[in-house]
Amino acid sequence: MDKRFNPVSLPQQLALRRQAVEDVLAHPEWSLRESVRHLKKTLRLTSAELARLAGVSMRTLQDIEQGRSEGTVQTLNRILGVLGLRLGVVRRVRAADEDD
């Protein structure tokens, strides 16, 4: 936990995790960079802590956060996996009026 914040109880940590997931899912327009930064901030983690939890190097995480790298699908799945999320691709369903 980032030392700039006061320690939070387990129920509060779980609430923060739920909120982080809901926020990311509610904002599909966010870039991956924005999503990762939001997760880190909401969970009150330092880059080093999130990198350790995700099993990626701190440099890799910082490159994604600062826009120097888009990251690989595997790396992003590791980062999102901290919250039980996965990066995915879905087929866009065409509306009936687009067929015309």
Image: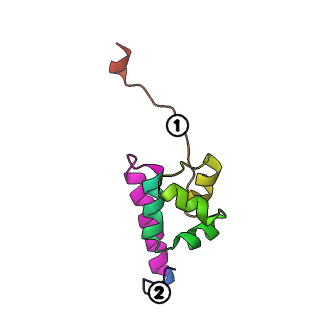
Image quarter hosting the C terminus: top left
Residues tagged 1 and 2 counted as in contact (Cβ below 8 A):
no
- Could you tell me which residue is drawn at 62 percent across and 53 percent down? 75
Q: Tell whether position 47 is magenta.
A: no
Q: Position of residue 77 (x, y in %)?
A: 60, 53
Residue highlighted by disc 2:
7
Which residue is farthest front? 68
- Could you tell me which residue is drawn at 47 percent across and 79 percent down? 11
Label ID, residue 90: 1
Q: Which is nearer the eye, 82 or 69?
A: 69
Q: Which is nearer the eye, 65 or 29?
A: 65
Q: Position of residue 69 (x, y in %)?
A: 54, 50
- Specify start and end residues of the magenta stretch as a single range: 11-32
Q: Which is nearer the eye, 8 or 78?
A: 78
Q: Main secondary structure of the magenta part?
A: helix
Label 1 or label 2, whichever lies nearer to me, is: 2
Q: Is residue 11 left or right of residue 97?
A: right
Which residue is farthest bottom? 6
